[in-house]
Amino acid sequence: MILLLSIGYYFCLPQQLFKDPTSTIITSSSNDLLGALIADDGQWRFPECDSIPQKFKTCILQFEDEYFYKHPGFNPISIFKAFQQNLSSGSIKRGGSTITQQVIRLSRRGQKRTYLEKLKEIILATRLEFRSSKDDILKHYASHAPFGGNVVGIDAAAWRYFNRNASDLSWAESATLAVLPNAPSLIYPGKNQKSLLDKRNRLLKKLFENGTIDELTYKLSIAEGLPQKPYPLPQITPHLLQKAAKNQKGKHIKSTIDIALQSHANQLVKRHYNVLKQNEIYNISVLILDVNTRKVLTYIGNSPTDKAHQKSVDIVNKPRSTGSILKPFLYAAMLDAGDLLPNTLVADVPTQFGSYQPENFDKSYDGAVPASEALSRSLNVPSVRMLQGFGLDRFYHYLKQLQLKDLKYNTNHYGLSLILGGAESNLWDLCKSYSAMASTINHFNDNSSQYFTHEFIQPIYNSKSTIDFGKPTHEKTVFDAASIYLTFESMKQVNRPQSDESWEFYDSSQTIAWKTGTSFGFRDAWAIGTTKDYVVGVWVGNADGEGRPGLVGVQTAAPILFDVFKLLPKSEWFGKPYDEMIEVSICKKSGYRASSICDETSIMHIQTSGKKTEPCPFHKLVHLDNSERYQVNSSCESVSNLKTLSWFVLPPLQAYYFQNKSPFYKSLPPYRNDCTEVSKVTIEFIYPNQQSTIFLPKDFDGEANELVLKVAHSKPELELHWYINEKYIGSTRDIHDMATKPEEGEHIITVVDELGNEIKHKIIIAQ
């Protein structure tokens, strides 16, 4: 019988006392409350606390159970006094329960208050005393005691009634909460104020009389007022809270969020939102990552807009059109593969690929532009031509290595528009990729020129999570450190918004590698920047996808980006990864490796793979007469009189646009009349370029406007003869523009120079 009773006693207490649902709460890295979601049963019941504030602990013991640390779970004297009082009154007036017994009663909700139930509580209380420490029992009580209304537990009560952590409560506030569980349904803030005040002050007087608090503290405490109504809980990171609740519902998540930085960023976003909403732009998201730890320091899923404009939508993880934000990845990929040097000239001329005709944002062309400048100015045509030359499948392979989860289709689906916003991505993945690139340089420089196998790892927002960068290796993860460094060198040259355009003249400014993006139809505006220590990502637009005039990355997202960077500590610029670089002679004019005939060169550190690139193709040796006005050869001039010079020569179409932007560009001199010309002649159409359908607008009289045909010739001084469908329409010299009014339908344009060189082009005229 004793054995059976012992076994029954051992197993009489449930292993888990409380199974009530709890609120999901998220705190900052310094343990400040950022937000909470109410429990499934409609109660504000925080997860069980790890510790109890000393002031509240003192108050609750003095009010509820002075002998808590001395009794075995029940107090015989208190029970005898309560029995005596209840017997004399003929009803239950006093319970005589210890805190341990109250924990048992709270866990057995719904049980009637009878003497049999009291006996069960005593047995279970003694069993709990054997199983748990006194402090753990006190934690159970503080976490599950009712505090009036739908507030349960000391932590929830401290925030609901005093808008602060329980550890920050005064003696008066702690005493107020200590007396509430005694009669939570009858006395709580906002109701029965006198009764609550009397109970609190009696407890404070007791604390004064036993020497717990001094006279001054006592007088100041009783002078404090009572809370009148519950405060709303903080909502500093509401979207991160929702994100965390998907996998950790009902838990206390200590995040990596820097509450000071988050609060300032929230205010900053609110200020920009109040301006942008005047243009009916309602949504903003911001993400700040620590490059070295991959911790999320600030998470703003959306602006403080209203429900009608999707306030609850977390845009950080939503796929949006990328605009130009992928261009740095292409530049880095081409450097990494050895297909490009930082300042290699790339063509910037009107271009058409089938039915796809990309255009620069300002509708103008430079003819030829350094690749680094094409990136910093975000020129569309050079980017598309670079992608076409590099290979769509090769670039797509690099993007898949970056683990951009919204790239769900094959390359045929995206085509060359991939580099201009034809694909979708999200702020989380893009910031992750930029931080991994920055970290690659840092790790390479700090770890004896080694990489890490898990460099492109996901950022963390839970402080309990750990980052594992993997093992050191001499093999690059995606891009080599030199290619990334050279990419960032180009990105730091991007023109900043008007308020920061003179940043390099201020000591307080910091160097930032950054890039903007604007999607087709002005639906998405991006700005992402990185320093050695931080990555900041900004998205601006409308969650429903509505485009707005002026919704451009540099005008809307970039100002927010630089305002956020002003909140961050200043970082040094990246160290140059010398072990992944070689020193070579570069042609200043073309950006290629200098050939033996380049006239102006400079020494530059390039990525190791860059030694595979071809030497400069744009310099050629030309023979001139003594006046240097004409080209000559042995057919008309003595070899001893030939003056040989290196000349920078672009293809005709590139030269046509380049010379308009570069006044120092000199076309090749013509051959002297008495010379026999042997050089190759090149003709290219400027407009229309590629096979195309042309719509001729009509004027006010209903007449179709003229079509102006243009070609570029390597020897513009030659006379060109123009034909449409083999019908002669005119001749030009020097400036080769021809105006005509072709009929509706298909036509063949033919241009023949006086040397017999010919070029044809098919067009379709629509009116």
Image (cartoon, rainbow, N blue to C red):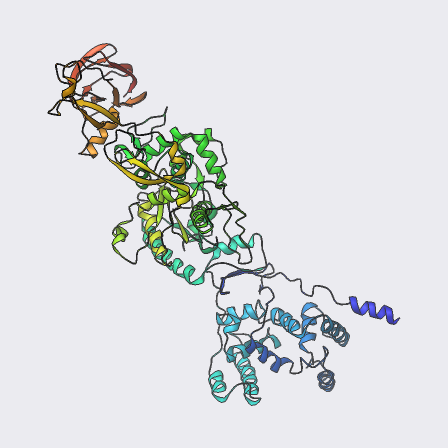
Q: On screen, 250 above or below 762?
A: below
In the image: residue 201, left or right of residue 488: right
Q: Locate residue 669: give its quadrant.
A: top left
Q: Locate residue 597: give its quadrant.
A: top left
The residue at the point 69 percent across, 75 percent down is 100
The residue at the point 49 percent across, 31 percent down is 410
Q: Locate residue 746: give its quadrant.
A: top left
Which one is in front, 215 or 590?
Answer: 590
Quarter placement of the C terminus: top left
Name the residue at the right extreme: 1
Q: On screen, 77 above or below 22?
A: below
In the image: residue 728, left or right of residue 98: left
Whether residue 499 is visible: no
Quarter placement of the N terminus: bottom right
Q: On screen, 80 above or below 342?
A: below
Percent position of residue 651, x then y: 26, 25
Percent position of residue 685, x then y: 26, 21
Percent position of residue 666, x then y: 18, 29
Which one is in front, 453 or 682?
Answer: 453
